[in-house]
Amino acid sequence: MKIKSIEVGKLTIPLKKPFKTALRVLAVSETLVIKLNTDEGLVGYGAASPTAVITGDTMGSIRGALAEALIPQLVGMDVMNYEALIAKVNSGVVRNSSTRAALDMAIYDLVGKMYGVPVYRMLGGHKDRFETDITVSVNSPEEMSADAKGYISDGFTTLKMKVGVGADIDILRVKAVRDAVGPDIKIRLDANQGWNAKEAVRVIRKMEDMGLDIELVEQPVKYHDFEGLKFVTDNVMTPVLADESVFSPEDALRIINMRAADIINIKLMKAGGIHNALKINAMAESAGIECMVGCMIENKIGIAAASHFAAAKKNVTRMDLDAPFLLAAEPVEGGISFDGPMIVLSEHPGLGIVKVNDLEILS
Ligand SMILES: [Mg+2]
C-alpha cells in the first residue's frame, strides 16, 4: 500500500476560557490536519499543534517543512515498511517535532487500518480507558480556586495547576486551591520553566512544610538547565517531572543518565510522534522512571494518537490529555470518547477517526 498524496488542512476552534501558563495566553486553538491518501483508498489522519514558545513550530513553519522537505520524499513510499517511512520522516527534517509528529501518527493510523486493529492494541493494549487530569490556568488565587471547584464538580479528581508566575504568590495559589478542594483531590503543579533552581527548591520545600500534598512538580526551571533540574530533583522530596527539557529520545537518555528528574512527560508534539515516544518510554521504564503523557492545545486527532500510545503502555502511569475538555467545539468525530474525566479508546482500526468537520483545506 503506497502513499499517493498528502493533503493539508486547518482547524480553528475557540477555547471555553483563555489558557494561561507562565509561557503564554491562548484564546483560540489553530491546528493543522494532514491526510495521507493511499493507492488502496485508506486514509491516515494526523495533526500538528503549533506551539511556538515550546517547540518553535508555527503554522507557517509546519506547512513549509511539509511542502518543501517531507511530502516530496514520502509520496510513493510503502506503508507496509513503516519503519523506513518513519525513518524518512525523522531524517527528512531536524527539529520541527510537531510536523514529524503529525506524519508519524498518520502512518500509525494507516498501519492500524491495514491490520484492522486499533493502534493502542497494536502497541500493547495495556488499558482501554484512563482518567486524565485537567489544567487550572494561572490566575489569581481566588479565580484558580473557583476554576478548581468547577472541575471537581464536573467529576475530575486530579488537577494540574499552572504556576511559575511569581514564587510567593504561587504558594498562595496552591494553598487557596488545596483549601478549596479538600484533601482527597490530587494536585500536580506545572511551573513551565518559571522558577530558577534555588527558588524552586525554596517554594517546593515551603509547600511541603505547609502540608499542601503536591503529587509532583513539572518543569520548575528553564528547559536547557539540566543541572538546575537535577539540583531541584536532588533537594526536594516531591517528585520532579521533566517536560520541556525532554523532546527527543536523546534528551530522555541524558535526563535518565543524570537522574535529573523523577518522571518524564512525553508529548507527541515534542517527541516527533509515537515511534520516538515508544523509545523514550522504553528507556525510562528500563531505568525505573515512570512516564506521563501530556499534550499541547491540540485537536482530537492529536489527543487520540497520544491516548492510543498512553493506553498501550504499562509504564505510562499519568495522563494529562485535557485539551478536548478546554475546547468550545468538537469538529473531530471518533478517535476517543469521554466518560466524565475518563478517556475511552475506540475499537475502530487505527486511531479511529471517523470524520473531520469544518476543515479548511490549505493544499
Ligand atoms: Mg508542562
Image: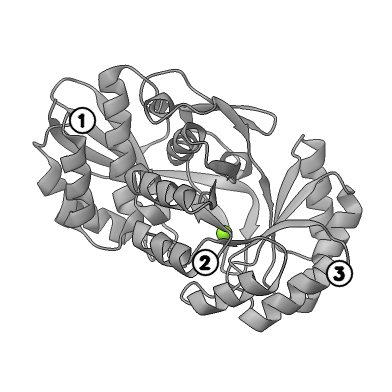
Give above or below for 88 relative to 118. Answer: below
Which residue has dot 1 on it? Answer: 37
In terms of image quarters, where does ligand 1 lie?
A: bottom right
Q: Which residue corresponds to mark 3?
A: 209
Between circles 2 and 1, the one closer to the viewer is: 2
Quadrant assignment, res 3: top left
- At 21% from the left edge and 59% from the top edge, which residue is drawn? 93
Q: Quadrant of the N terminus?
A: top left
Residue at 32 percent of width and 16 percent of height = 116
Sooner in the amino-acid sequence: mark 2 or mark 1? 1
Quickly name the residue at label 2.
259
Looking at the rendering, in which quadrant would you find the C terminus? top left
**Residue 332 at least partly seen:** yes
Relative horizontal placement of residue 117, taking residue 343 as reference (left or right) = left
Q: How many labels does the image show?
A: 3
Question: Residue 88 vs residue 313: left or right?
Answer: left
The foreground one among 358 and 256 is: 256
Cβ atoms at labels 2 and 1 below 8 Å apart: no
Reading the chain from its start, which is encountered first: label 3 or label 2?
3
Q: Do the residues labelled 3 and 1 touch (CB within 8 Å)?
A: no
SS class, disc 2: loop
